C-alpha cells in the first residue's frame, strides 16, 4: 500500500513541477488538474489504508472543487483579457 | 475462495491504476507541446483513477464506499473531459498560431525521410546520365 501511495505522490510532484515551470497559463492549469486528480487518488487510498471512511468524503469534496476551479479560472481570465 | 479472488483482482487493478498515473506523470514531464500534454494527462489520469477506485471497491465491498467511489469517478471523468476542451480552446485563443505555441515543435521529422530517397534518386540519375552520355 505504501508503494502505491508513494507512486501517486511522485505523480503529484510531477504535476507540481509542471505548475511551477510552465510557460503559459494553460500549462499551469493543466498541472493543477494533475495535482488535484492525484490528490483525490491519494485520499481514496488513504481511506482504505488508515481504515477511516472520513477521507472518502474529503476526496469527494476535493473532486467537486476540482471540477469547478478550472472552469472558473478560465472564465475569469477570458473576461479579463 | 471468492474473497481471495476479489483481493487478488483488487490489488491488480490498483497496480494498473498506479501504472497509468505514472504514465500520465511521464507524459506531463516529457511531452513537448501543450496539446499532447493535455491529451496524455486527461485520459491517463481519468483511467488511472477509475482503475484505482475499482480496485478499492473490490477490496472493500460495502455499498456506501462503492457509491462514493463511483460518484468521485464520475465527477473526475466529467471534469477531465470539460477541462481538456476548455484549456485547449483557451490556449488557442491566447496564441492563435498552433505551431508556434511552444518551443520544441521544430520540423524534425521532415529531414529524416528526405535524405533516404535522395541518394537513390541521384544514383539512378547519375547512372542514367552516364549511360546516356556513354
Image: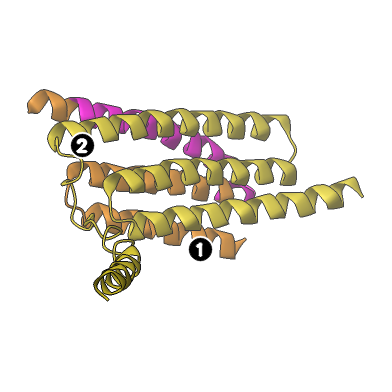
Chain colours: A orange, B yellow
- The local secondary structure at tag 1 comes to helix
Q: Is A61 one of the magenta-colored residues?
A: yes
Which residue occupies the extreme front position in the image? B134
Q: Is residue B59 above or below residue B62?
A: below
Vertically, is B79 above or below B124? Answer: above
Q: For the residues tagged 2 and 1, is the chain the same?
A: no
**B105 up-or-down from B83: above or below:** below
What's the chain of the residue with tag 1?
A
As drawn, the label of residue B91 is: 2
- Label 1, residues with CA under 10 Å away: few <14, some 14-19, many ≥20: few
Res. A6 mark: 1
Left or right of residue B30: residue B13 = right
Give the magenta part as a residue range.
A46-75
In space, the residues marked 2 and 1 are separated at their CA atoms by 32 Å
Q: Residue furthest left?
A: A81
Residue at the image point whose x is 35% and y is 68% from the top: B120
Q: Residue at x 15, y 26 (%)?
A: A78
Q: Is residue A49 visible?
A: no
Callout 2: 10 Å neighbours few (<14), some, many (20+)? some
Amino acid at each position: 500500500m505504501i508503494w502505491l501511495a508513494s507512486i501517486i505522490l511522485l505523480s503529484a510532484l510531477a504535476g507540481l513541477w509542471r505548475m511551477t515551470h510552465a510557460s503559459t497559463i494553460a500549462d499551469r492549469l493543466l498541472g493543477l488538474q494533475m495535482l488535484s486528480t492525484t490528490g483525490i487518488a491519494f485520499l481514496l487510498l488513504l481511506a482504505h489504508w488508515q481504515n477511516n471512511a472520513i477521507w472518502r468524503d474529503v476526496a469527494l469534496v476535493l473532486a467537486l472543487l476540482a471540477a469547478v476551479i478550472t472552469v472558473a479560472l478560465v472564465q475569469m481570465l477570458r473576461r479579463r483579457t | 475462495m471468492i474473497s481471495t479472488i476479489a483481493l487478488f483482482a483488487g490489488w491488480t487493478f490498483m497496480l494498473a491504476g498506479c501504472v497509468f498515473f505514472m504514465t500520465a506523470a511521464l507524459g506531463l514531464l516529457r511531452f513537448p507541446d501543450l496539446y499532447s500534454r493535455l491529451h496524455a494527462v486527461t485520459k491517463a489520469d481519468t483511467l488511472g483513477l477509475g482503475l484505482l477506485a475499482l480496485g478499492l471497491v473490490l477490496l472493500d465491498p460495502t455499498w456506501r464506499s462503492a457509491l462514493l467511489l463511483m460518484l468521485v469517478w464520475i465527477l473526475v471523468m466529467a471534469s477531465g473531459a470539460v477541462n481538456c476542451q476548455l484549456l485547449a480552446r483557451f490556449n488557442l485563443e491566447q496564441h492563435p498560431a498552433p505551431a508556434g505555441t511552444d518551443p520544441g515543435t521544430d520540423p524534425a521529422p521532415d529531414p529524416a525521410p528526405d535524405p533516404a530517397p535522395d541518394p537513390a534518386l541521384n544514383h539512378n540519375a547519375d547512372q542514367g546520365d552516364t549511360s546516356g552520355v556513354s
